[in-house]
Image: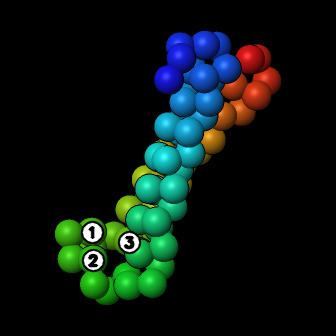
Amino acid sequence: MQLSRSNMLEVIHDHAMAHINKHRMNVEVYLANPVGVGEHPDIMEAIEKELEEMAKYHDHIEVLKEYF
């Protein structure tokens, strides 16, 4: 892969989307099986942490769109 500006921006975007999808899947697991997640006794807090991570990477994508 060539190291061009557009390729680097695409990779940064894809990286952020992969993290969003990972954290989204974790939220889906919590929502589908809240009793089966033993290491997280406070499911709502665990979901909030996942949403915070999603928001962080969503912000990265928005900054890319706005400024690059």
**Which quarter of the picture shows residue 10?**
top right
Horizontal side of residue 16 vs 34, given as left or right: right
Residue under label 1, please give it: 40
- For the point 64% across and 13% down, the residue is 5
Q: Can residue 57 be seen at all in this image of the molecule?
A: no
User: On the image, numbered disc 2 is attached to which residue?
Assistant: 37
Image depth: mark 3 or mark 2 in front: 2
- Amino acid under label 1? His
- The answer to which image quadrant residue 61 occupies is top right
Q: In what element is the residue under mark 1?
A: loop
In three-dimensional space, the C-alpha distance between marks 3 and 2, rounded to whole angstroms, equals 8 Å
In the rendered view, tell whether residue 54 sits above or below residue 9: below
Do the residues bearing badges 1 and 3 touch, measured as CB atoms within 8 Å?
A: yes
Rounded to the nearest angstrom, the CA distance separating label 2 from label 1 is 6 Å
Mark 3 in CB contact with mark 2 (< 8 angstroms): yes
Pick whichever of labels 3 and 2 is earlier in the sequence.
Answer: 2
Residue 60, percent across and down? 61, 31
